[in-house]
Amino acid sequence: MMTPVSIDKNEILKYYKPIAVDTHKGIQGHALIIGGSYGKIGAVCLSSKAALKAGCGLVTAYIPKCGYQIVQIAIPEVMVLTDRNKKCISNISFDLQPDAIGIGPGIGQDEVTRKAFLKFLKTNEIPLVIDADGLNILSQNKAWFLLLQPGTILTPHPKELERLIGKWISEEEKFEKTISFSLQYNVIVVMKGAPTYIIDGETLYKNTTGNQALATAGSGDVLTGIISSFLAQGYESVQAAILGVYLHGLTADLAAPKTGFQSFIASDSISNLGAAFLSLE
Ligand SMILES: NC(=O)C1=CN([C@@H]2O[C@H](COP(=O)(O)OP(=O)(O)OC[C@H]3O[C@@H](n4cnc5c(N)ncnc54)[C@H](OP(=O)(O)O)[C@@H]3O)[C@@H](O)[C@H]2O)[C@@H](O)CC1
Ligand SMILES: Nc1ncnc2c1ncn2[C@@H]1O[C@H](COP(=O)(O)OP(=O)(O)O)[C@@H](O)[C@H]1O
Ligand SMILES: [Mg+2]
C-alpha cells in the first residue's frame, strides 16, 4: 500500500484560511443541507448546526414538512425550506444559490425520495457532499455514479463503503477498490473509521485526530455539515474533506478529558469546534 499523507496540524496549516476581518455573512459561504425524514430530523439538525459552527455565513436546511418546527426551534440561526411531502423528501426544488450542498443525513430510502435524488443528481452543478442514505440509494443504482460532478465528496462508513464498492477480502484490496472507484468517477472518498482515510484518486491521506468517543449516533452527520461548510467557504473539495475530518476528530480529542469516551455525544463535537479552531491559531 502506498504511504499515506498524514493529516496533522502541519498539513492543515498549509491551506487553512483564517477569517478575514472585513468579511460578512454574504461572502462567508451558504451551505444547503438536504435530508431528514420522519424520526430522523435530528440528523439534519446536527449537520446544519455543525455547518454554521464550522464558519459558513448562511445555512439552509431542506427537509420534509414534519421537520419544520423541529429545525426552527432547535437552531434558530438556520433557515428552513420544506418539501411538499410530510414525512420524507419527494422533490428537491429551491430558489436560492447555495455555494455547497450536503445531502443524505437521515433522508431515508423511500421510493419518492430515490426519484427526487435522481432528478437532483441529473441537474446539480453545485459542489456536493453525499452521506448516509444518499450513499445507500446511490449504491443500489450504480449507473447514477456517472452523474456525479468531478470533486463530489462521498463520506461512507465501512458498511456504506461496502455497499458502494462491494466486499473486500483484505485491507489492501479495500484501498485498491476505493482508489479505482475514486479514479473512475473522479470523486473524493472519505473512508470513515478509526482512523479515517481520504482518497483523492491515487493520493491517500490518513487522519491523526479522533478517538472512540466518536462512536456515537450522529457523529457522521456532524462531519457532513462541517465538510459542506468548508466547501461553501470556497475550499477545494479535497481540502474541505481534509480540514473537516481533522477538526471533527480534534473536537473529540479536546472533549474526551472532560466527557470521557462514554458520555460524549455528537452535539459535544459541535460545541468543541470553537476550541478546535482556536488550536490552529
Ligand atoms: N438522530 C438522527 O436522526 C440520526 C440519524 N441517522 C441516520 O440514520 C440513517 C441510517 O444510518 P446508519 O449508519 O445508522 O445505518 P446503516 O447504513 O445501516 O449502518 C449501520 C451499520 O453499518 C455498520 N457500521 C457502521 N459503522 C461502522 C464502523 N465504524 N465499522 C464497522 N461497521 C460499521 C454496522 O454494521 P454491522 O457491523 O452491524 O454489520 C451497522 O449496523 C442515515 O440516514 C443516518 O444519517 C444516524 O446518523 C444516527 C442519528
Ligand atoms: N472508534 C473510533 N475512532 C475514531 N473515530 C470514530 C470511531 N468510531 C466512529 N468514528 C467516527 O465517527 C463518525 C461516524 O460516522 P457515521 O457512522 O456515519 O455516524 P452517524 O451515521 O451515526 O452520524 C465517523 O467520522 C467515524 O470516523
Ligand atoms: Mg452516517
Image (spheres, helix red, strand yellow):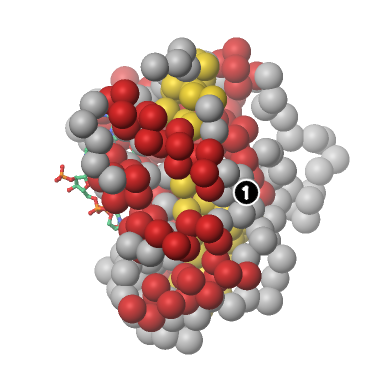
The reply to whether residue 93 is in sight is yes
Instruction: Give residue 238's quadrant in the image.
Output: top right
Residue farthest along the bottom direction in this orientation: 84
> Three-letter amino acid code at disc 1?
Pro
Q: Position of residue 152 (x, y in %)?
A: 56, 49
Q: Height in image: 170 above or below 62?
A: above
Q: Position of residue 43 (x, y in %)?
A: 37, 57
Instruction: Give residue 106's quadrant in the image.
Output: bottom left
Q: Residues within 10 Å of mark 1 (few under 14, many from 20)?
A: some
Q: Height in image: 9 above or below 202?
A: above
Q: Position of residue 265 (x, y in %)?
A: 30, 41
Where the C terminus falls, by quadrant? top right
Q: Residue at x 52, y 44 (%)?
A: 184
Q: Residue at x 31, y 23 (%)?
A: 172
User: Mark 1 highlights which residue?
Assistant: 150
Name the side, left or right, on which 56 lies relative to 247: right
Of residues 122 and 210, the one drawn nearer to the viewer in this rendering: 122
Of residues 8 and 114, the one drawn nearer to the viewer in this rendering: 114
Q: Residue at x 62, y 40 (%)?
A: 237
